């Protein structure tokens, strides 16, 4: 696979970083995952704004302009029309191991494009399993940091308990999935936790709220108690790679009647239509 690394386009086996790279040593870096539909970068400007937010929050100067980043992505895509995703990672670069920031070092920038593998339609029609787990992450989950150990452990726990995702809770409230935003539907209202330091400001989250509001579906960005999650009529997960996905089993129990709900089906239709229009050159 071709990757971009610090100005060069290389085969992945030829791409090398220093063993002292701070991304490797400390998880000192940030990343983005951007879907590509019909060769077009989906919600690119929103992803670039979030990238800048993450870089600012960790005090890492933005090493490339938006135009340069877009150029790298376009080169990596090389005119492909199949659905893809771009992974971009920026770390504080290589320096002798010392926790505080090194002087005058260059950031490491890595990017590559890969096929976008979605949950298949069967999984979408049956829904997926999830488990609840205490949120053991730090208190700046709004930063899309590559330090993902707590997310990795939560996702592994889910995998070992026949579930696709772990839904995380902190102080009795739901935050998000280990790698997704969480929504519930309760009495016809689509509810998701508010933005803040406890969750990643999901790009898919914002699109779902946009689509719901445009279609007069009631929505609320408010805290969700764990009890409300357990009693929800519907639970959804959302991310750039999952899009919107229904959870039909939580901690081994059926969510409502154990099938994807009506509001999910409506949202899935809106999402698919939006993607379809995007593919044919409309919208951003
Ligand atoms: N993860 N919350 C967390 C913790 C995430 O890792 C992600 C996405 C999201 C959803 O964000 P978005 O809608 O912008 O993709 C929420 C990506 C896909 C990943 O780590 O691969």
Image (cartoon, grey):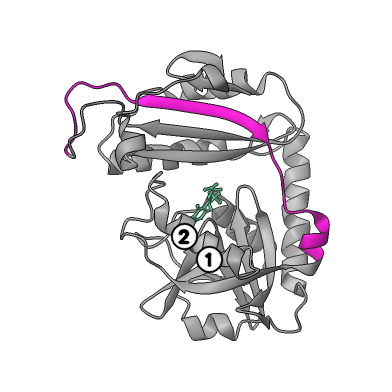
Q: Quadrant of the C terminus?
A: top right
Which residue: 76% across, 65% down? 266
Quick one: 61 or 11, which is closer to the camera?
11
The image quarter containing residue 33 is: top right
The image quarter containing residue 256 is: bottom right
* Membership of 114 in magenta stretch: yes
Which residue: 52% across, 16% down? 14
Compared with residue 232, is residue 35 higher up or lower down, i.e. above or below?
above
Residue 92, image x and y in percent? 30, 31
Q: Is residue 66 visible?
A: yes
Distance Cα–Cα, label 1 vs label 2: 6 Å
Mark identifier at residue 157? 1
Residue 276, image x and y in percent? 78, 43
Left/right placement of residue 61 relative to residue 44 reads left
SS at circle 2: helix
Q: Quadrant of the N terminus?
A: top right
| The residue carrying mark 2 has its beta carbon less than 8 Å from ligand 1 | no
- Residue interval drawn in magenta: 100-125
Compared with residue 65, is residue 33 higher up or lower down, i.e. above or below?
below
Q: Contact (CB < 8 A) between labels 1 and 2?
A: yes
């Amino acid at each position: 696979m071709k990757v971009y690394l610090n100005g060069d386009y290389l085969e992945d086996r030829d791409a090398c970083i220093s063993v002292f790279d701070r991304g490797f040593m400390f998880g000192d870096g940030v990343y983005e995952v951007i879907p590509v539909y019909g060769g077009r970068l989906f919600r690119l400007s929103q992803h670039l704004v979030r990238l800048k937010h993450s870089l600012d929050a960790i005090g890492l100067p933005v090493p490339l302009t938006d135009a340069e980043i877009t150029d790298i992505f376009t080169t990596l895509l090389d005119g492909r029309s199949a659905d893809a995703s771009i992974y971009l990672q920026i770390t504080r670069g290589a320096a002798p191991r010392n926790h505080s920031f090194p002087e005058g070092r260059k950031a490491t920038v890595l990017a590559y494009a890969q096929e976008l593998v979605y949950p298949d339609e069967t999984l979408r029609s049956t829904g997926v399993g999830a488990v609840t787990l205490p949120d053991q992450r730090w208190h700046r989950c709004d930063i899309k940091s590559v330090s993902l150990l707590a997310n990795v452990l939560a996702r592994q726990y889910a995998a070992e308990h026949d579930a696709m995702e772990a839904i995380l809770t902190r102080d009795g409230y739901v935050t998000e999935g280990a790698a997704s935003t969480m929504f519930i539907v309760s009495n016809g209202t689509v509810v998701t936790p508010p933005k803040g330091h406890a969750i990643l400001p999901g790009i898919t989250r914002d699109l779902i709220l946009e689509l719901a509001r445009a279609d007069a579906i009631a929505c609320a960005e408010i805290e969700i108690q764990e009890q409300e999650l357990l009693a929800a009529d519907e639970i959804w997960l959302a991310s750039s790679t999952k899009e919107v996905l229904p959870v039909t089993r939580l901690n081994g129990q059926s969510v409502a009647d154990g099938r994807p709900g009506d509001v999910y089906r409506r949202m899935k239709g809106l999402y698919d239509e939006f993607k379809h229009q995007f593919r044919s050159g409309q919208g951003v």
